[in-house]
């Protein structure tokens, strides 16, 4: 059958001439605007498509089942972040390398409340020491099936007795903060998160060594992979600070992790965001409400994040070594100060003073703890006052009464100190570039600075563990590497 011929195409439509008085809108501007609109819409669609379905990889739990008499919901979102000592999926080689031998205790190694502000511009992280004195609500032991009346425990034991649900109930009872979501991370998911981001950068002003975990870092800057980061946050035997020192390192690590995530571009690239999320979610546990929309919401919020957007603190401790029969030594919270802290969290207010900070050299001891007497070792009038004022401006406790030295021909600035305060002396010397340290037994805690002809200016310094504010909170930019 012959194919019918098509009718001739109509002549091209003539574009009407524009009035001569009308400004011509450039076609390229229209095309660029249209292209940008399509790109933005496509990126949003691809972003959602990339992440949709990933929440199916999460091991789901219901920590809020049948919970009653809960605290009122405040502003913002509260996530209970729990780190467990799960090590079942770690290879024998990794266990040996990172000192992860032994059986897991099926308890929490880390407990933190992560508060995201209502406007999603701030993240407040409050560490709850695992040895905190706690009182559990009435519950059924998940191991024995026995019904327990309320009784005292260490906070980390709540997980062993009643799992995530009892942990949430106990934390809510202690803080009066309503928990919106629960996220549980074990050793495997922790290492994966770090490795997928390409590692984290950690700085320390003094060597960190712990024979229990195998951590061995010289003073300076280090790029840690997942296993090394795990050693860093688990170490408790570096100094006498034990768990409190470990929590400071955990907070410093989280600030470094946020810095890495927000600077690496992973949150701006839907494919990289999907790959990172997919790699991590298979080894975490979360509540049923923590899904695709929450992941996207979190990803979008963090695009505008920087280290200064985060703040970290530990719940105030009122009594160390609080002995409880049958439990041992615990940490008793300062109820009044802790109450103010959690009131502030519920009201969605910042815990730390957020302000622009000048670049400064990191030192071991806060300048506010170091007493200094300044003397002028030159014939230059007023030099002693300049040095005294400069040191006071960066935080040192100077006498504010500089004197003239017996020798007025000193060429190099000298810091004299008692060997028992050597860490303080090094922090002071860091503020005086090129100065010489001279140990003098019996000097006591008062340092003496003899300004020499080489003095130019005082360099700003800040402590690796900054002096705390009302809640002991610091912002992320205070603790990450410069």
Image (spheres, rainbow, N blue to C red):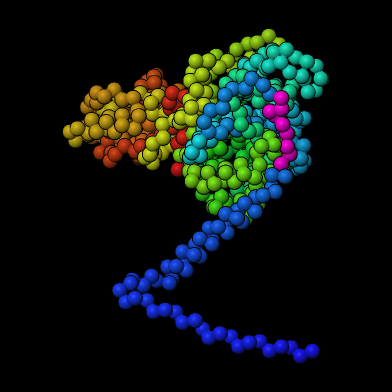
Which residue does the image show at 23% across and 30% down from the upper left?
A: 385
In the figure, residue 188 lies in which quadrant? Answer: top right
* Magenta run includes residue 60: yes
Q: Is residue 392 above or below residue 261?
A: above
Q: Is residue 123 left or right of residue 271?
A: left
Q: Is residue 255 above or below residue 103?
A: below
Which residue does the image show at 56% across and 27% down from the upper left?
A: 73
Q: Is residue 353 left or right of residue 187?
A: left
In the image, 206 versus 257, the foreground residue is: 257
Q: Residue furthest top?
A: 325
Q: Is residue 72 above or below residue 305?
A: above
In the image, 201 versus 180, the foreground residue is: 180
Q: Which quarter shows the C terminus?
A: top left
Total label count? 0
* Magenta run includes residue 250: no
Q: Position of residue 120 (x, y in %)?
A: 51, 39
In the image, 193 versus 462, the foreground residue is: 193
Range of magenta residues: 57-66
Q: Is residue 107 visible?
A: no
Which residue does the image show at 75% across and 30% down from the upper left?
A: 104
């Amino acid at each position: 059958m012959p194919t019918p011929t098509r009718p001739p195409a109509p002549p091209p439509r003539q574009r009407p001439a524009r009035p001569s008085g009308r400004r011509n809108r450039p076609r390229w501007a229209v095309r660029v605007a249209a292209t940008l609109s399509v790109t933005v819409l496509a990126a949003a669609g691809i972003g959602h498509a990339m992440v949709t379905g990933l929440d199916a990889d999460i091991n789901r739990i219901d920590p809020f089942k049948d919970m009653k008499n809960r605290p009122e919901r405040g502003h913002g979102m509260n996530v209970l972040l729990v780190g467990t000592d799960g090590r079942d999926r770690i290879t024998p080689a990794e266990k040996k390398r990172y000192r992860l031998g032994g059986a897991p205790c099926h308890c929490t190694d880390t407990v933190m409340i992560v508060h995201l502000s209502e406007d999603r511009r701030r993240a407040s992280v409050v560490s709850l020491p695992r040895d905190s004195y706690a009182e559990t609500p009435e519950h059924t032991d998940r191991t024995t099936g026995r019904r327990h009346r309320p009784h005292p425990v260490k906070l980390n034991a709540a997980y062993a007795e009643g799992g995530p649900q009892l942990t949430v109930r106990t934390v809510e009872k202690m803080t009066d903060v309503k928990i919106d979501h629960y996220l549980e991370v074990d050793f495997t998911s922790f290492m994966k998160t770090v490795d997928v981001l390409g590692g984290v950068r950690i700085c320390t002003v003094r060597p960190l060594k712990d024979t229990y975990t195998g951590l061995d870092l010289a003073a300076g800057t280090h790029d840690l992979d997942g296993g090394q980061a795990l050693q860093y946050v688990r170490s408790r035997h570096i100094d006498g600070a034990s768990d409190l020192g470990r929590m400071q390192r955990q907070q410093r690590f989280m600030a470094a992790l946020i810095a890495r995530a927000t600077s690496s571009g992973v949150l701006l690239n839907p494919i990289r965001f999907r790959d990172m999320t997919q790699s991590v979610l298979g080894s975490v546990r979360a509540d049923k409400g923590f899904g695709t929309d929450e992941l996207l919401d979190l990803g979008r919020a963090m695009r505008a994040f920087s280290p200064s957007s985060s703040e970290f603190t530990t719940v105030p401790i009122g009594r160390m070594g609080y002995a409880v029969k049958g439990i041992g030594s615990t940490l008793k919270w300062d109820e009044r100060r802790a109450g103010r802290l959690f009131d502030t969290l519920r009201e969605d207010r910042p815990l730390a003073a957020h302000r622009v900070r000048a670049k400064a050299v990191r030192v071991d001891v806060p300048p506010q703890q170091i007493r200094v007497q300044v003397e002028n070792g030159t014939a230059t009038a007023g030099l002693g006052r300049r040095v005294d004022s400069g040191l006071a401006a960066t935080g040192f406790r100077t006498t504010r009464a500089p004197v003239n030295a017996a020798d007025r021909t000193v060429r190099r600035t000298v810091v004299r100190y008692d060997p028992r305060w050597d860490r303080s002396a090094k922090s002071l010397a860091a503020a005086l570039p090129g100065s010489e340290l001279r140990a003098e037994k019996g000097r006591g805690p008062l340092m003496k600075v003899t300004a020499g002809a080489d003095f130019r200016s005082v360099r700003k310094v800040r402590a690796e563990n900054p002096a705390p504010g009302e809640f002991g909170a610091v912002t992320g930019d205070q603790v990450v590497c410069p």
